[in-house]
Image (tube, grey):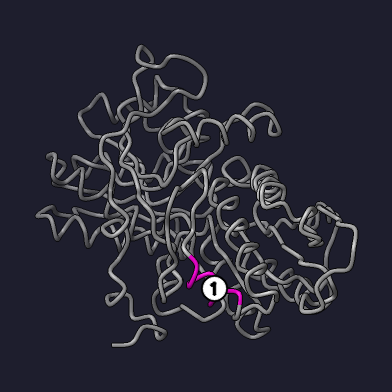
């Protein structure tokens, strides 16, 4: 059951006057934002994802359209059993229609199973495992924003092609890290590189010294960090103390967020190559939206995970409106029919395997001398077109895809 630590808020939004549509269960569309509110992934998703969900409801105009929408928020503590229990409580007792966000791939896979059993809807913005649109795909789930394949394809191939041929992996020991290591190793090998070794660290972890010494001893040109959030920033900070970069080796952050670069500072993060789906300073639309977000979130610019929650919730509500129903698998099917378009990702679409596709970007972190102010951290190295950014649908083994 829930504790005060687990459920942070149940915020009623856009309570419109007038009767709700009869096809909406209970007369209310209930959206559950499930993520890490206080731990390793709190900065990159956490409370900021709740802000993004609220913005989507407001921008959709739910109140003006006579649609009643509620947001529930829970902290899954990065534990699959906690995530499963929250999902069951939400679906069975609180009558939640859709769960969104969900960092931590092991939690994603657990919640995905519960969602299928309860015949509800799941839209993952922050969990990364590409298995969600592969062997674990269901008619109830959609994968937004990015996945391990798109990250490996962007960062891994770019680094190998520019001379980073030998790799050593420092991997978070759970589903996400394993999938990211697997997908990146495949890209490295495909492009003529070689993996010299790998080591797996507990999740989360504060002390990386023994793992970094193994990576240093391997003499690999590239140390691939198959982890995220505080694990990534701690590894890079401790790596600086060991003189790893000064010794000629380079870190490749395989899942790096804007908040990670902010925590590291440009002095330590400069030159890092990374793949993201979004950056606040890409164009006029992203800048305008991000400044609105920052005004509601302590001045911080949004991460791609938070932008993904906004985009996903907006598209979900459009599908509910078009369908005049919040029936989980029917809404998911309608989301696949309708093209998406929003200020953060621009135009996109949802494939039959549940993969939302849009452009991805290869970024390089700026030198301190290149930054013009707060949050001015990235320069675009390459745009990866939507059709190339994600795993081909016929290669994922999703049972929904016809052979």
Residue 335: percent from left, percent from top? 53, 69
Residue 332 drawn in magenta: yes
Side of 195 where 31 appears, left or right: right
Residue 64: percent from left, percent from top? 78, 53
Question: Residue 111: in sight, yes or no?
Answer: yes
At 53% from the left and 57% from the top, the residue drawn is: 125
Q: Quadrant of the N terminus?
A: bottom right
Vertical position of residue 295 compared to residue 353: above or below: above
> Camera-side residue: 291 or 363?
291
Side of 232 where 367 appears, left or right: left
Residue 350: percent from left, percent from top? 44, 67
> Camera-side residue: 380 or 55?
55
> Dot 1: few (<14), some (14–19), or many (≥20) neighbours within 10 Å?
many
At 56% from the left and 74% from the top, the residue drawn is: 332
Vertical position of residue 59 compared to residue 96: above or below: above
**What residue span does the magenta drawing correspond to?**
331-338
Q: Mark 1: which secondary structure?
A: strand
Residue 353 drawn in magenta: no
């Amino acid at each position: 059951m829930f504790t005060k630590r687990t459920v942070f808020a149940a915020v009623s939004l856009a309570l419109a006057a007038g009767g709700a549509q009869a096809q909406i269960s209970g007369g209310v569309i209930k959206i559950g934002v499930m993520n890490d509110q206080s731990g390793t992934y709190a900065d990159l998703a956490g409370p900021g994802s709740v802000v993004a969900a609220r913005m989507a409801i407001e921008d959709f105009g739910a109140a003006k359209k006579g649609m009643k929408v509620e947001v529930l928020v829970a902290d899954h503590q990065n534990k699959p059993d906690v995530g499963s229990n929250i999902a069951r409580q939400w679906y069975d007792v609180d009558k939640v229609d859709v769960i969104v966000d969900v960092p931590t791939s092991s939690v994603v896979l657990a919640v995905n199973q519960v969602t299928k059993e309860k015949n509800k809807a799941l839209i993952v913005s922050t969990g990364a495992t590409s298995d969600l649109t592969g062997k674990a795909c269901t008619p109830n789930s959609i994968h937004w924003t990015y996945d391990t394949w798109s990250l490996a394809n962007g960062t891994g191939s770019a680094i190998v092609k520019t001379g980073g041929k030998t790799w050593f992996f420092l991997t978070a020991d759970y589903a996400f890290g394993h999938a990211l290591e697997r997908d990146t190793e495949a890209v490295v090998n495909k492009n003529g590189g070689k993996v010299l070794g790998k080591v797996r660290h507990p999740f989360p972890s504060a002390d990386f010294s023994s793992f970094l010494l193994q990576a240093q001893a391997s003499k690999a040109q590239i140390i691939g960090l198959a982890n995220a959030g505080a694990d990534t920033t701690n590894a890079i900070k401790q790596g600086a103390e060991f003189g790893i970069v000064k010794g000629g080796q380079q870190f490749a952050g395989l899942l790096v967020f804007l908040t990670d670069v902010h925590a590291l500072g440009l002095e330590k993060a400069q030159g890092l190559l990374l793949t993201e789906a979004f950056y606040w300073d890409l164009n006029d639309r992203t800048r305008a939206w991000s400044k609105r977000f920052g005004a509601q979130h302590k001045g911080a610019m949004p991460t791609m995970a938070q932008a993904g929650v906004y985009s996903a919730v907006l598209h979900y509500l459009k599908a509910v409106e078009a369908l005049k129903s919040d029936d989980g698998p029917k809404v998911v099917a309608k989301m696949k029919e309708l093209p998406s378009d929003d200020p953060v990702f621009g135009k996109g679409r949802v494939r039959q395997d549940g993969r939302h596709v849009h452009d991805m970007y290869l970024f390089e972190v700026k030198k301190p001398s290149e930054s013009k102010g707060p949050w001015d951290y990235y320069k675009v190295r390459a745009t990866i077109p939507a059709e190339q950014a994600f795993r081909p649908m016929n290669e994922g083994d999703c049972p929904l895809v016809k052979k």
